[in-house]
Image (tube, rainbow, N blue to C red):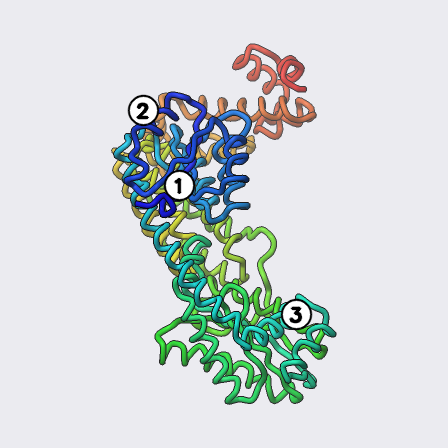
Amino acid sequence: MKMSSLYRALFVDDEGLIREEVSKNVPWMSLGYELIGSCQNGKEALEIIESHPVDLVLTDICMPYMDGMDLSKVLHDKYPKTKIIILSGYDEFEYAKRALQYNVEEYILKPVTALELGEALKKLKGTLDKEREADRVFGKMNTAYRKSKMLLYSNAMQNLIVGNKSEKESRKELKELGIELTSSYYRVAVVQLDLYTRDKVLEEKAKRESALMAFVVYNISQEVVKEYEAGYVCQGKDLCTLLLLCTDRKKEFEKGAWDICSKIVNELKETMHLDATVGLGSYVEEVRDIYHSYEEAEYAIEFRYVSGSRRVIEIGTEKIGKEENKALEQCIESFILHMKAGEFEKTAKDIDKMKEEISNVRMEKDRIFLYFRQMMDKMGELLKGADLKDTSIYQKQYEVLKEIMKDATLEESLERLKQYGKEVEDSLEGQKNTRGKRYAILAVDFIEKNYGDSSLNLATVCSYLNISTSRFSSIFKNTTGKTFMEVLIQTRMEKAKELLSNTDMKNYEIAEKVGFSDPHYFSISFKKITGKTPTEFARETRF
């Protein structure tokens, strides 16, 4: 194997012994790599990479000056083609989630053998080989394309539509190509293949390997627009196709624009078996404002995740979800509560309700994903509370989130959440040996949410759970090791401590806040539990 064909790798770890062992024991060259060096922190690694670019960085997380996560973020932002493998002694899900954000290829837990690392490197080499070949093929095609007159036309039209140049400059470029814009109204549409909806890493690979598909979309779009004598077509960024629709009869052309876009979608499906989505911007009257219509069309494409693919999407004056969605948060709370209660048949309905809420107010995928992460975190807390943190189902959260990021539609993501939720439910059900534990979990949750109600007592909780006080008392004590009143008082005191330490509230205000109608009784109870009066505790803990 020639040295030029090897992929350049850099190893980063603050432990010298580990650097030595990995450098010596991994058969780098036979696996297709050249280890150009090793360093002890992210800062040193970046200094090397800036002058000697690499294909792969293997890094630990905990290091001085710059840790592995910060290094991964810089690589993700500045060197997106550089692959990252994390070797870490931390199995916390938070680290895995951050790694997911930075498109880390592998997250391997230490200790790792040379054989295990070799397998990961071998797998990654397959990916690198495909990208190198795709770059070669795509580069060859791109070079030939740039020499054609089509590129001049496409560049000029794209500059006009996207707004890269002034109206005067764009008109001059187009005029030299024999194109003059004299219509009264203009409207932009963006056509994009649905296979490009995946996460950024896969998206880039798909684009490089499927460049010819972009020409197919361009050609079919051009034929349809020519048939309607409706404007111009060019290729845009990210291998999408741009349509500049022109008319002097806006009212008559309202339906015509939709017909053109729909026909492109249908012909791509029928003749080439390709799924595409079209984002359609609104009409503008001035050439200098065409880029506004383009921005609307680009924005509309983002909603294919919610609206579904293989269709025409127009944002127009529709309501867009920008603020926090309380109804959606309530769906998540209901989902988790039903899980806690073991009412698993209701969790699927909660997810269906989520779909309804998301569809009613259109929301960008990134914002939806935050709600999904919130659900995963809450399910993780349930698993932790049931002593299931070390199980495969808990660790699977990272993989599920990774797959959700790749999903092309909301339907796919919600189905994936349902499937994982069912696995969590099965694990929780298996962990609960008696119905009593379920009652105890619900009771503690009820206390957490209602401790501030001074009328809260044993009867209140038993009424909520629909169980007799004598039976509940026995179950609760056997499950938690404490009486209901002990847990209630402990909860109230812990909340009181937080308020005394972190606020300037008066003692009587805190007493009322945590469920004591009598401030004097609150002070007595607080001192009995903590050994200090509220005033003494506040003086010692407030900054």
Q: Which residue is mark 3?
A: 291
Give the residue pinned by disc 1.
379
Image location (x, y in percent) of residue 69? 49, 35
Foreground pick, 277 / 321: 277
Question: Mark 3 or 1 closer to N-term?
Answer: 3
Q: Quadrant of residue 232?
A: bottom right
Q: Nearer the viewer, mark 2 or mark 1?
A: 1
Q: In the image, is residue 481 above or below residue 284? A: above
Q: Nearer the viewer, residue 409 or 286?
A: 286
Q: Amino acid at mark 2?
A: Asn
The percent position of residue 163, horizontal first and vertical second, equals 66, 68
Q: Amino acid at mark 3?
A: Tyr
Helix or strand or loop: what does disc 2 sit on? helix
Residue toward you, 178 or 119: 178
Between disc 2 and disc 3, the foreground one is 3
Residue 284, above or below 506:
below
Residue found at x 39% / y 54%: 132
Q: Residue at x 45, y 71 (%)?
A: 214
Query: Compared with residue 448, is residue 180 higher up or lower down, i.e. above or below?
Result: below
